[in-house]
Image (tube, grey):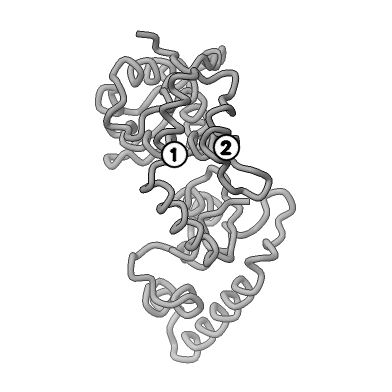
Amino acid sequence: MSSNPSGTQAPPPSKDKRYLLHIEANGVIRGKDETKWSSRCGKYIRAHIPIGYDDWRNVDKVYTDALWNSLMTEFEFNIDPILARPLLEAKFPQFLRTMKYHLRATIKNKEGIYLPKPLALAQCPDDIDKIWWEKFIENEYTPKKIEQRKKNAENKAQCKISHALGRKSYKRVYEELEEEHPAEGVTRSEAWKRAHKSKATGSVLPCALEKYNELEAAEKRQKEAASASGHDGVSSLEDLETDPIAEVFGVDKRVVVVQLAQHPR
């Protein structure tokens, strides 16, 4: 059984020294090389994992071993690789979903509408095995998937604000702000504002400008109120039920910044 069933050529191993990743107990990667890990995971999954699998748990071990071995040519960890592997592999299903997301563009028309199934079958990319492509198309055109796409489109229509993170995690935004201002605490509103500024120009994304201005006004208002009452404002800004994020977007019952849109620019 081939470890490269799709026919995609695996990226060549890096000739430079391996990147050192710091892995936390929950599998979270810390540090500047987080984006490199994400990028290489995406490329190696495209090279080694057949797209016909609808569930990562069903992927044959020969494919996951080939994937892991390729990654080990470029990365090392602060913990034993045997301990790191299950922690990191828990995130691999998302990379597979991302790969399929990009492949779905080949079976849509210019308006983003899915092609009829016979036409979709004929769109097999040159680097994808036709047998696995047929399986992928079968999975994409089940009644359940069609209904799921309808619901996703409805949810996406309700999301009006994009972010500028790319592959960077929201956790990494907090780390960068902490590195820039180690003596100061990082608030949710500061992280939100950073995530909605263009990396290239530093300007606020037009779709986020209204909420950005509302956040700045809320920050100013809360700081002035805290100062008038003799407090430094820190506890108020960190209260998830009353901080500027909660004031502008409403209380976040999931205890995350849910206002970070899911559609990157």
User: Above or below — where is 256 with respect to 170?
Assistant: below
Quadrant location of the N terminus in the rendered image:
top left
Asked whether the residues under the numbered discs 2 and 1 touch, taking CB atoms below 8 Å apart as contact, a structural biologist would say yes
Q: Quadrant of residue 238?
A: bottom left
Give the label on residue 140, or none.
1
What residue sits 60% from the left and 60% below the top?
Answer: 196
Residue 28's disc number: none
Residue under the image location 46 percent in, 52 percent down: 149
In depth, the one of 169 and 115 nearer the eye is: 115
In this view, the residue in front, 183 or 67, is 67
Amino acid at pointer 2: Ile
Along the line of sight, the residue nearer the viewer: 154 or 37? 154
Look at label 1 and name its amino acid.
Glu
Which of the marked residues, 2 or 1, is nearer the chain's N terminus? 2
Return the x and y of residue 95 as percentages of the image width and height.
44, 35
Residue drawn at the location 52% of the way across and 45% of the way down: 168
From the top left corner, tell me how far across and down residue 255 is, in percent.
34, 65
- Tell me the distance, in whole angstroms, between the alpha carbons under discs 2 and 1: 10 Å
The residue to which callout 2 is attached is 107
* Structural crowding at the residue carrying mark 2, measured as other residues with C-alpha within 10 Å and reported as few (<14), some (14–19) or many (≥20): many
Q: Quadrant of residue 92?
A: top left
Could you tell me how many numbered marks the image carries? Answer: 2
**For the residue labelled by badge 2, is the local secondary structure a helix, a strand or a loop?**
helix
